[in-house]
Amino acid sequence: MPGGPAPAARPGAALRAVRFAALGDSLTAGIGDPVDGGWRGWAALLGGGLGPEGGGEFRNFAVSGALTRDVEEDQLPAALDFAPDLASVLVGVNDTLRCAFDIQDLAGRLDRVCRALAAQGAVLLTACLPDPGTMLGLPAPLARPLARRQRAVNAVVHALSERHGAVHLHMADAAWVADRTLWSADRLHPGERGHRMTAARFHDLLAARGLALGPAPSLEADRPPPTRTAALAWLATAGTGWVVRRCQDLLPELLRLAGDEVRHWARGTTARLDLHAEHALSTALTALGTRPSGPSLAGTGD
């Protein structure tokens, strides 16, 4: 978690229920944690433990498939109208899966979202996330380009979290990624146990700052983790549909990225791809007037 003092609560916040706004994509929308009639997810679980005796107001503005652009243009205005005391902003994985991925554009949009919420007095919640190539177990020529992109996104999130004094959670830790009991059958979204773990870890960080007054979310899952049979069934049904939908935009870009990866590997010049990604990230952070506080983009981890 970045250092620095916790932002002051909005005047009068202690006189009413804590307002928590969640912005982002399918992770925050609750995919992987089904309940009767829809999805629940880590943000809803956390929302019940922010105020005394579970008191609080929670609004989930996250939408499955959302890009950083969608968060800025669609979710942010509604969240600002809600005037939250706490606001989570977890987004970026979908951006890495698009051919139009531009780390400088993403960084600018994410900075504007964070600045607008912080300017209203909201305490920010952020997280660095694992890359989809690792989660899906893709072969190296496909996984490495996606890993570079996600590490760039995480570097931007680290820098902005430090700038705005955000409550930051490391979800790209190797131990977190390797524990398959935390993940749903699609291997991209947390399962119920993963959502509960995320909520509990955020609650711990908020409680350390005196920002969570209610009980921590329970780690006890209502349902068992998905079996290997369930994972295979998902891949054969819903997973196939997901791949088909993504192929129109993602497949041509993945093939291009994989082709570049293979060519550079054959020539022994893979380091050039890392340097190109480092340069793009450096340009993005320079435009923000900040520098990365996390590990090097060329390294491993988040």
Image (cartoon, rainbow, N blue to C red):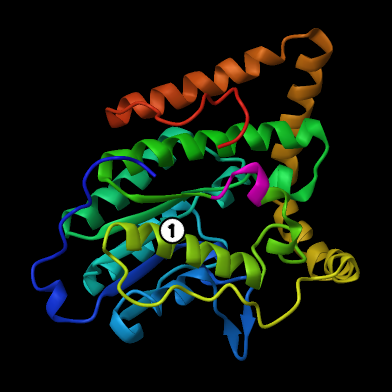
Q: Residue furthest left?
A: 11
Residue at 73% x, 49% y is 178
Residue 32, visible in the rendered structure: no
Residue 52, visible in the rendered structure: yes
Give left or right: position of 248 versus 46.
Answer: right
Q: Which of 250 and 201 lies nearest the eye of the viewer? A: 201
Amino acid type, mark 1:
Asp
Q: Which of 85 and 4 lies nearest the eye of the viewer? A: 4
How many marks on residues?
1
Q: Which image quarter holds the N terminus?
A: top left
Q: Residue furthest bottom?
A: 36
Residue at 46% x, 34% y is 155
Q: Which residues are magenta?
A: 171-176
Q: Which residue is mark 1?
A: 70
Residue at 26% x, 45% y is 164
Q: Where does the image place residue 87, in percent across and percent down from the top left?
A: 32, 63
Compared to 221, does 117 lie above or below?
above
Q: Where does the image place residue 93, in percent across and percent down from the top left?
A: 57, 49
Give left or right: position of 70 versus 275.
Answer: left
Compared to 289, does 55 lie above or below?
below
Res 231 quadrant in image = bottom right
